[in-house]
Image (tube, rainbow, N blue to C red):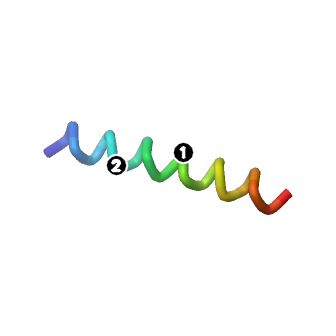
Amino acid sequence: MYQLLKSASSDLKLWIVSFRDMLT
């Protein structure tokens, strides 16, 4: 469960970073 949560949060960070790069 913890491993799943950790991988999901890292995926979310990656998505946010790529989205922010797309906006600028």
Q: CA distance from mark 2 to mark 1?
A: 10 Å
**Toward the viewer: 5 or 15?**
15
Image quarter of residue 10: top left
> x and y percent of residue 8 in the render?
34, 49
Q: Residue furthest front?
A: 22
The three-letter code of the residue at mark 1 reads Leu
Q: Image check: 20 left or right of 12?
A: right
Q: Residue drawn 86% across and 57% down?
A: 24
Q: Residue drawn 65% across and 50% down?
A: 18
**Toward the viewer: 5 or 22?**
22
Q: Residue furthest top?
A: 3
The three-letter code of the residue at mark 2 reads Ala
Q: Secondary structure at mark 2?
A: helix
What's the mark number on residue 14? Answer: 1
The quarter of the picture where the N terminus appears is top left
What's the mark number on residue 3? Answer: none
- Residue count near mark 2 (Cα–Cα under 10 Å), binned few <14, some 14–19, many ≥20: few
Residue for badge 2: 8
